[in-house]
Amino acid sequence: MSPLLPLPRALGALFAVSVALVLQASVFSHLAVRGVVPDLVLLVVVAAALAYGSELGLVLGFGAGLLLDLAPPADHYAGRWALALLVVGYVAGRLAAPGRARVTQWLPVVAASSFVGTSIFALTGLLLSDPGVGVGELLRVEVVTLVWDIAMGLVVVPLTLGLFAKVEPDRVAA
Amino acid sequence: MTDLLTRPAARRTSRRPVVEDRLNRRGSLEPREPGRPRRSLVVALVLACVTLMTLDHVNDGAAVDPLRRLVGEVYGPVESGVSGVVGPVVAVPHWLRSKHDLASDIDRLQDENDQLHSELAASDYERNRLQEYDDLTATAESIGQALVPARVIGIGPAQSFSRTVTIDAGARAGLAPDMTVVNGQGLVGRVLRVTSTTATVLLVVDADSTVGGRVGRSMKVGFLHGRGDLGDTARLDLELVDQTYVPAKGETVVTWGSQDGAPYVSGVPVGRVDSVFSSPRETTQRAVIDPFVDFSALDMVGVVVPSGTQSDRGLIEVDGGLR
């Protein structure tokens, strides 16, 4: 049984998640549409799950979500993004088509993942009544997020897949 | 023989992960698909998430705060650096839009314009920042408190539904949790937690934020709640304790202040009364407040600190001087 996270893959994933996290907090906040920024971290998790399957997606989703929960300026209950991205990683891994993926195959996966991720985050928020926000606001934000994520997914997912192919050139992608 | 061994097909099979078989409930063998997680792993990670949420829920998140601080120490400086590079670039389109009519100019002037574009984009940004420093100095004088100047380096996304920002001053600049954050226009929020170089600020427009407010003219007190909106539509709700009093439109609301100035010092302007509602069902008056601060364009802020605090940067003292 090969290890789930060999060192180059782990470093590549940490690098991709960190870059996505910083861009999301410091750069895309200037480009936000009604305060909504693209979920770059979610897109990186989706790309990793597409490349390596649902087990790695699950673990990376948990780790990346945890970072998103703890890095400033986050203030919601820690563990909410971790739970959302964990499910996203698993679902994206299960939905991934075997073999070398084409855009028409992975773009629906990105859309579904974005919807699932933001929904789970919003639902845990409603359950814990973390921020006092209504359902109408949730839906409005979710639609904008979906559009952002699909648009940015076209860039982020190929970049991340390329990064993984570069750190482990001997491993044929999925 | 050697030819066979080096064939790519043979190599690929040897590298494929060994499929682990396991017994299912009926006692028959079930092969595990490669790349599919074990059920125990899924359960463990989901439980970890739930545990974290619970830990953060009880005791106001005291158990998770060290973790937050650790991650903040690593990512805070990176966010700060990236924000410093991005700031001047972001100022460029803003400038271009305001001078859009120049685009129709003739070719001879166009070359000259291009040069001016680049120069002015930077100088506009610098001039704005100087203006913000001036405003902060005036604020320090008017509220009679020493301020630590800081810049906003990260803004929480709307999909998190909490209105928080990161600023580039932390414990080394003399900051601590529950300090008041202001800017040249008025009250911004309060410090939630600090790392050595950054701090997280809860904006007053956050839906969870509550500030004690006082209507300026009548000294009547009440509580200001955020609505979670940013931008031009950002409003605060003021619930007055005295239900017989109806504040007039345009009256100024300032903070009421708490003991020892934590989390809010008194007398900081918050906003102006926009409209007033009263419902017999809820027994209080509710006034809608238009905040002075433009929360969608926050840049320079000041954190209220005790006078004479040790800081790694210039401190704006009560008399408006820098120390």
Image (spheres, grey):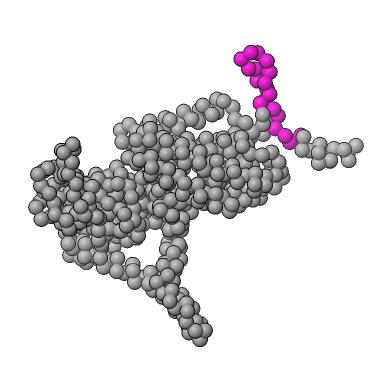
The percent position of residue A52, horizontal first and vertical second, equals 63, 39
Asked whether residue B260 is in view, the answer is no
Instruction: Reply above or below: B190 against A129.
Output: below
Total numbered badges shown on the rendered structure: 0
Residue A148 falls left or right of residue B284 = right
Instruction: Reply above or below: A115 against B102.
Output: above
Give the quarter of the figure containing the C terminus of chain B.
Answer: bottom left
Q: Is residue B21 magenta?
A: yes
Asked whether residue B222 is in view, the answer is yes
Residue A40 falls left or right of residue B213 = right
- The foreground one among A113 and A156 is A113
Q: Image point 25% across, 49% down: which residue?
A: B236
In the image, farthest residue toward the front: B280
Q: Image point 77% across, 34% down: which residue?
A: B13
In the image, farthest residue toward the right: B1
Residue A9 falls left or right of residue B53 = right
Give the quarter of the figure containing the N terminus of chain B.
Answer: top right
Q: Image point 81% across, 36% down: which residue?
A: B10
Residue B201 falls left or right of residue A52 = left
- The foreground one among B194 and B143 is B143
Q: Image point 17% across, 44% down: which residue?
A: B278
The percent position of residue B17, horizontal first and vertical second, equals 70, 32
Stretch in magenta: B14-32
The percent position of residue B41, horizontal first and vertical second, equals 55, 28
Instruction: Reply above or below: B180 against B104.
Output: above
Q: Is residue A108 magenta?
A: no
Instruction: Reply above or below: A15 against B297.
Output: above
In the image, farthest residue toward the bottom: B108
The percent position of residue A19, horizontal first and vertical second, equals 52, 51
Q: Quadrant of residue A4?
A: top right
